Image: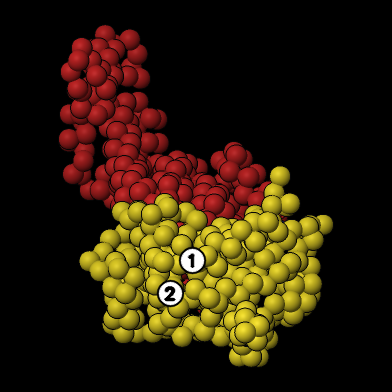
Amino acid sequence: MSQIEAFKHAQPVPDDIAVSTRNICKTYGSVEALKDMTLEFPRGQLTSLLGPSGCGKTTLLKIIAGLLPPTSGEVTVNGKPVTGPGPDRAFVFQDFALLPWASVLRNVAFGLELRGVARSEREDIAARYIREVGLGGFEQAYPHELSGGMRQRVGLARALSVDAQVLLMDEPFSAVDEQTRRKFQEDLLSLVQNENKTFIFVTHSIEEAVYVSDQIAILLPRPSRVSEIIRPTGFRQKSADSIRRDPEYLDIVDDIWASLRSYVE
Amino acid sequence: MKLFGINLPAMSSLILWGLLWEVVGQAELTFFVPPLSEVVRTLVTIIGTPSFLSALGETAYAFGMGVFFSILIGVPTGILMGRSRLLDELLLPWVNVFLSAPLTALVPVLMVLFGFGMKSIIITTALFAIWIIILNARTGVRQINRSLVEMARSFGASPLEAFFKVYLWAALPEILGGIRIGIIRAVKGVIIGQLLISIAGFGALFELYSTNFMMAHFWAVLLVLFALAFSISEFLAYLERKVAYYAAVR
Ligand SMILES: Nc1ncnc2c1ncn2[C@@H]1O[C@H](COP(=O)(O)OP(=O)(O)O)[C@@H](O)[C@H]1O
Ligand SMILES: [Mg+2]
């Protein structure tokens, strides 16, 4: 019996690693944003970076994206060191980063446009992802005509349509209202299941992290470090709406809060 | 504007000023101000004449070329300054100096450098317009949302693509504003050029009419010039309003 118990709580560490960061340090002038950050991101799974604001989540994500050079350390994607942005990664921005002068269709196709895909082909692909994120019929609308939640769907569709293996999402749902946010979280779960992609998801919401993640890296500020890696496994198979009532879900939320509360005045 | 609860059409105050002009002119207070009605009558008689049309053509050509070059050079320079710290440090002091410098004083130097012809007039025109165009393009680029820049980079935009597909458009409201003010300054530039460098175009007409005390003719040409400058500037203001919807949400 104890054996079965032990088995149930065993947390298998996948050996297929899509992205890894090794000893990443980043200083801005005298501010030490990241110190010796070593993390691994399993392929096909969603890993959250969870921590209070200012602990360097965005910085780490941008270093993985190749948008920022680390002061020292190395990021590898599929074993290859990162030296800049690349087609294997796509970014979803906290403030959406849409072109305000371009239609939804052109915005979603913009990543492909920059990659030199012919117009008719990229618009076909974009139209498909626009429908997939539930924006069918809004192809010709402009960003300022859409709600925050819809704009982020555009950002998501843009990231999906370049078909990168790794999706980097920086607090993608923080600028949308609570109801939309819940819907987004549910959609994200099915996205992780259906698309065989590696998701790296930044959030400061404990509930959100536990709800959507296969793996949670809890970051602590000053100096920034990984305090814990949690792999919620028990409720992953459950339906989207029963997760929030699952005892393991609630326990993990409590545990994380207990370990973070001392850092929040 | 509203008067006694009645909505007046735009610029109806011009009617008031026109009336005042007519009254002052009719009162014959000074030979310098003939009545507006006389100016308008003169305008009608000279507007189709070959000398007027060739003056208009000459001025329009110098003006058009000057504005063309100031936009062609000014907008990219401003955008590059907004993007590159080094270039900004190098050029910004000069832009600010020339923006507020009395450029008329430079015209003799231009004449020495570029001769007494059309070339110098075009350069004078461009010199009047370009600084505000640079400065506005720079301002526009500097306040582009950082994540828009990062978005372009993260999806693999080359510097050239980022320039033409993101920076230029994102800064468009400010760029158009700069071009509008630049064009108003270019009107000044082209007339000063045509007065000082070679007596040509509208400059020649002004010279001719003022030295012969043909005040009605003088004012008529000035009215045409104002009307042209005003129309161009209004057209640009219209374009500006068309892109204003995204100025707020960039
Ligand atoms: N460009 C920058 N220049 C200077 N300091 C920065 C810059 N970007 C971030 N920082 C600092 O680095 C720390 C981590 O920032 P960030 O990665 O944005 O944190 P998070 O996303 O977790 O809120 C913060 O203390 C922030 O003030
Ligand atoms: Mg952040």
Q: Nearer the viewer, residue A3 or B209?
A: A3
Residue furthest toward the front? A1
Q: Which chain does the yellow colour mark?
A: A
Q: Which mark is residue A246?
A: 1
Q: Nearer the viewer, residue B54 or B80?
A: B80
- Disc 1 marks a residue whose amino acid type is Asp
Q: Is A10 above or below relative to A250? A: below
Percent across and percent down for residue B246 are: 39, 52
Q: Which mark is residue B49?
A: none
Q: Which chain does the red colour mark?
A: B
The residue under the point 20% across, 15% down is: B5
Q: CA distance from mark 2 to mark 1?
A: 9 Å
- Quick one: label 2, few (<14), some, or many (20+) residues within 10 Å? few
Q: Is A229 above or below relative to B196? A: below
Q: Nearer the viewer, residue A28 or A130?
A: A130
Q: Is residue A77 left or right of residue B44?
A: right
Percent across and percent down for residue B184 are: 42, 42
Chain to which the residue tagged by mark 1 belongs: A
The residue under the point 17% across, 35% down is: B44
- Quick one: label 1, few (<14), some, or many (20+) residues within 10 Å? few
Q: Is residue B83 left or right of residue B34?
A: right
Residue under label 2: A238
- Disc 2 marks a residue whose amino acid type is Lys
Q: Please, which colouring scheme is shown?
A: by chain
Q: Secondary structure at mark 1?
A: loop
- Can residue A209 be seen in this snapshot? no
Check if mark 2 and mark 1 are on a common chain: yes
Q: Nearer the viewer, residue B15 or B82?
A: B82
The residue under the point 33% across, 36% down is: B226
Chain to which the residue tagged by mark 2 belongs: A
Q: Secondary structure at mark 2?
A: loop
Q: Are marks 2 and 1 in contact (CB under 8 Å)?
A: yes
